[in-house]
Image (cartoon, rainbow, N blue to C red):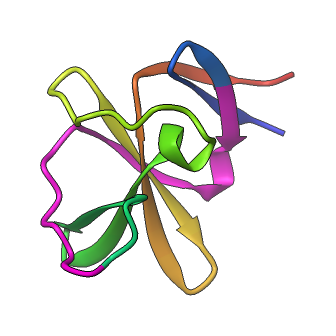
Amino acid sequence: MKLVEFTCHGHRFAAPLTAVRRVVASAMPTPLPGSPGLVAGVLNIGGDIVVVIDFGLRLGLPASKITPAQHIVVLSIPGFLLGIVVDDMGGVIEP
């Protein structure tokens, strides 16, 4: 199985390549009033609405502001697209 490797707050993670729709340079999501603090907002990427979350915050790590150096990994989850904010991309690996 091929995986896409990335880092968040100094920790290494990976997602199945088949679940990764695309990786985009960081963009500022449009905030959603009343949404949980975990939700950074939404992005329109190629006509698709993507909910973007602070991945580090979801893991119990400190919240971070989105910077131009970060990336958003767009994952295809059954029923919707989810964007996770990550610090750096490591590439495709095959463990």
Q: Which quadrant holds the N terminus?
A: top right
x 18%, y 28%: residue: 67
Vertical placement of 32 versus 21: above or below? below
x 33%, y 70%: residue: 50
x and y, in percent, of residue 72 in the image: 35, 43
Q: Is residue 21 magenta?
A: yes
x and y, in percent, of residue 9 in the image: 50, 20
**The one of 38 and 48 positioned closer to us in this rendering:** 38
x 36%, y 69%: residue: 51
Vertical placement of 79 versus 27: above or below? below
Horizontal side, residue 12 vs residue 44: left or right = right
Q: Which residues are magenta?
A: 13-34
Horizontal side, residue 40 vs residue 80: left or right = left
x 61%, y 40%: residue: 60
Q: Quadrant of residue 86?
A: top left
Q: Quadrant of residue 38?
A: bottom left
Q: Which quadrant holds the C terminus?
A: top right
Q: Residue furthest bottom?
A: 79
Q: Quadrant of residue 70?
A: top left
x and y, in percent, of residue 84 in the image: 44, 49
Q: Is residue 26 magenta?
A: yes
x and y, in percent, of residue 5 in the image: 62, 26
